Amino acid sequence: MKRLLIFAVGVLSVLTIKAQGQVEMAVAIPRQTTEVSHNTWNVIRNKLVDAMTRNGVSSVVYSGIVVYPEITVSDEQLVESGMRNITVIDIQLSLTTEHVVTGTVFSTLALTLRGEGDNMDKAVMRAINKILPTDDRLNAFMVQSINIITRYYQENTNTIIQKAQNLASTKQYEAALALLSSYPTSVSGYSQVSKTLTEVYGEYQNSICAQKLQQARTAYSLGRYAEAASWLQQVDMQSSCAKEARVLCQKIKASRDAETARELATLERIYQNQADLEKQRIKAIRDVVVTYYKSVPRFYYVF
């Protein structure tokens, strides 16, 4: 995939632009990366999350936009010091903000750091700990990123919608929903994106509802009413399977499984309440998108 690299125009000009939108970003690490300890990656993640919060970025666990760190050791020396040897290293910590679905690179930053310790990992940890919350380079990078990202969405709304529709047309619904879900709600084109998001989710539901309904019917025929109810809860009530799902819901309610009947009575109330139905739909879209992020081959989101 061709990657678009958008370069900074200078720290001073970036700092004059205040980010207005709720851009969401997550911290991720490449799956093929320098081997450092879990604790070291967590220290890096915490520093990045802190920088996001300080500069108006909404930090989330999963997002279509990630900032990812990479560590390169540029020099390593073993210094003999009394009873123990000390490892002294110079590292480059590279930070990149990127769109997971499109591969668009928004901003990059490289920090050169030195650390020392009893072993390589401790030396890396010492180097990373030298990054302070007030580090102007890191804060400028976050402000730069959020403004470039906001501008990108403002200028590419129609392109994003078209790409999502193309993905949906080839049944790549999860990728399409992830692309649309990452659009900031405060950007002016969001109403168009939201409409497309609803349409794509409807197509996605129509493509899977028959399978969910069949699973529910199979469970019902075997007397596994709770399982059948669970499958029915995954059928969107505006999909093409809605009528048949309601019929099966009534059959399960008539069973002797009182607990399952109560659960389905609650589900029916949700069906009848448009606000609750919308909440359920938003949650369902989020679940689909998170599952997609977890399957992304390039990154780990949780570490």
Image (tube, rainbow, N blue to C red):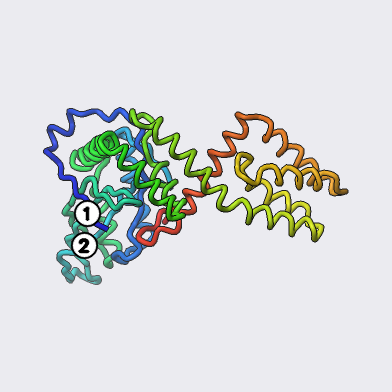
- Quadrant housing the C terminus: bottom left
Label 2, residues with CA under 10 Å away: few <14, some 14-19, many ≥20: few
Numbered disc 2: secondary structure: strand
Q: Amino acid at mark 2?
A: Thr
Q: What residue sits right under mark 1 in the picture?
A: 94
Marks 1 and 2, the one that precedes in the sequence: 2
- Quadrant housing the N terminus: bottom left
Q: CA distance from mark 1 to mark 2?
A: 8 Å
Q: What residue sits right under mark 2 in the picture?
A: 72
Residue 199 in view (yes/no): yes
Q: Are marks 1 and 2 in contact (CB under 8 Å)?
A: yes
Judge left or right: residue 134 versus residue 252. Answer: left
Q: Residue at x 66, y 46 (%)?
A: 233
**Residue 223 coordinates in the image, percent (x, y):** 82, 57
**Residue 40 coordinates in the image, percent (x, y):** 34, 57
Judge left or right: residue 113 versus residue 282. Answer: left
